[in-house]
Amino acid sequence: MINKQLISPRHIAVIGASEHETKPGGKVLLNLLSGGFKGELYGVNPNQLNMVGVTHVKKISDLPEVDLAILAVPALICVASVKELISKNTKAFIIYSSGFGEAGEEGKILEKELVETISNANACLIGPNCIGVMNENYKGVFTTPIPAYDPQGCELISSSGATAVFIMEAAMSTGLRFSNVFSIGNASQVSAEDILEYMDKNFDNNSPRVKLLYLESIRNPFKLMKHATSLIKKGCKIAAIKSGFSDAGGRAASSHTGALASSDIVIRALFNKAGIMYCSGRDELISAGCVFQSKPLMGNKLAIVTHAGGSAVMLTDALCSRGMEVPLIESEKASQLLSKLHAGSSVSNPIDFLATGTAEQLGEIIDFCEGLNEIDGIIVVFGSPGLFNVKDVYQVLDEKMQSGKKPIFPVLPSLVNAKNEIESFLSKGHINFSDEVVLGRALPHVYQCPLPTFGMTHLMDMETATIRSIISQAPNGYLKPEQSKELLQACGINLVKEYLCYSLDCVKMVIPKIQYPVVMKVLGPLHKTEVKGVTLNIMNDDRLFSEYERMINIPEAKGVMIQPMIEGVELYCGAVRQGNFGHLILAGLGGIFVEVLKDISYGLAPLNKTEVSSMIRSLKGYEIIKGYRNNKGVNEEMFADAIMRIASLVNFAPEIAELDINPFRGTPNELVAVDVRIKIDKTM
């Protein structure tokens, strides 16, 4: 829980205070003093402490009542210190100390006692193993830099203190501004989700609109999605890095879905549902923050204005390869503009006004782009060869960014030659993208970031009583084929006609009911193709009998399944339970496309029609679904309906651990499930 004592303390005590700024207990005192903390500040240390503005106290028992205690002492004495502070009614704690849960079993026991002590006192804990908190009221960190507080700057939540420092260091050079910074460390009590909840519940018209997150764990995915979605609907923008997604969990999976469902995909699905922009690293996160703090881009058509042809080419490539457009400009006004530029200039887009271009010409070009309906935003790439001062160019850029209606994204790469001019430009509240390709990657990502869909779910009508009956009676492990078939029928999914045979006599009895060609599949082994347990295009009785005799001798074979040969495009849909994230739904083209090319899309269940449509259309093989070169495609609505039914099924039957339908066979008029495998696990 976050309380007012943490956010706006009247008095702060630093336990383990020091006069030496090389120690955390000393550096935080300097930061609190220089940061303008207006309340009472106490430094607790048995030795003498002589610092103007700090009241020295030898031991905790000598302290008066304080709102916030910052602990910079060894982990082993933290619990005793906290208990003593709680007896004095301290309600907020920031603990820098390491040596807790991250250090092994003994540390975990110590951390558990720490959290229980603080929680039982209805108090708040940030950390341990963190660098602290910065906000308008105080700078409770032992690190630098300390960004100047901007009420509309970015709010930063970071699991790692060092990473928070790296982000701020790099971001400040771009002009990115900060408001509140929370380094949560082990997040033993207060997590990133709790901070988002606090930001959401206390949001008003004066609240910062940009949130940047570096997360090493997500303990409550639904809480994260709920409050991120709420904040975004209130006008906020959120970008996040989630580290620690590489794992070997998929290696032991027994289904295609299980093998494909990496932790990274789960996080991406969660972020998509919440409307959070997924970032792979600090540069991307910072670039997202810079775009967020610019005027919003209302379309995907951009003008590139530059005096550097190579930069324009790289930027154009980066933008266009990610779905943005750099449209050709051919209006009559273009020739009028060209007449105002030096010979050799080009206005077709990118607009190149050469290294000799002037500030006045830049102003003319920006005004020209402002008047074009086919342009939604302007990127200006302007550096300096060091031959002349470019201050007037940046002055024009400043004026146009303030007066224009369209967003202007400045790329000012001359961090050495134009250092002073860039610093002056940034001091006016602007940002700078020093690398055009970084901007070219970030801008499409921000523009295309999906709107939140959390809470906008749609559960399909299905026979829930039948579904629950099957699940409640089923043991852990894979359902029998007939149970899987019954479950999908209750779900409302169309299945191919099939005959299960456990003897040759049974095969003979099936013959009058089938029409050649047919498919035979072995029952028993999990991966049929790996044991040569699938035979296609069986055309007569003799082949049917011989294939049965061969398959029944495959190790673990229990029988065979006979199905008619179904024409159509092979499709795939699966579901896999991902702990407290719920079920991940995957879909794509079936057969080799899912096994080899891994052309899949994904979402967290349950899903709505918009999410499913986006999943289908994002597939690289979507043209196959639509139909190409006189080849019939698939009924897209039927495929979407099937995906939504699977997403609804796992909502009604959370005991489903893994589900594979591979393949569906799809035509313009029909969608039929051909092969299904469902695994039950009730030990969750």
Image: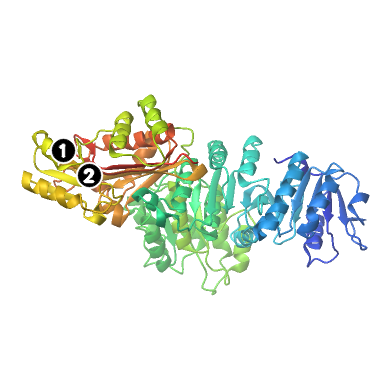
The image quadrant of residue 678 is top left
- Mark 2 surroundings within 10 Å by alpha-carbon count, few (fewer than 14), some (14 through 19), many (20 or more): many
Quarter the N terminus occupies: top right
**Residue furthest bottom as drawn:** 387
SS for tag 1? Answer: helix
Can residue 164 be seen by looking at this rendering? yes
Apparent side of residue 621 relative to residue 255 in the rendered image (left or right): left
Q: Answer yes or no: do the residues labelled 2 and 1 have beta carbons within 8 Å?
A: yes
Q: Which mark is residue 214?
A: none
Where's residue 64, x and y in %? 91, 46
Q: Is residue 661 left or right of residue 253?
A: left
Between disc 2 and disc 1, whose residue precedes? 1
Does residue 414 lie above or below 566 as drawn? below
Q: Position of residue 635 (x, y in %)?
A: 23, 37
Q: Nearer the viewer, residue 375 or 237?
A: 237
Q: CA distance from mark 2 to mark 1?
A: 10 Å
Looking at the picture, tell me which residue is in the foreground, 485 or 376.
485
Q: Residue 358, percent across and down?
A: 49, 64
Question: Considering the numbered disc 2 on the image, is that residue within a helix, a strand or a loop?
Answer: strand
Q: Crowdedness of circle 1 by 10 Å Cα count: few (<14), some, many (20+)?
A: few
Mark 2, residue position = 559
Q: Estimate the x, y position of residue 323 in percent, counting from the top left.
A: 36, 52
- Residue at figure coordinates x 88%, y 59% from the top left: 45
Residue that appears at 63% across and 48% down: 155
Instruction: Say which quarter of the image contains residue 166.
Output: bottom right
- 684 left or right of 656 in image: right
Q: Can residue 324 be seen from the camera position used here?
A: no
The amino acid marked with disc number 1 is Cys
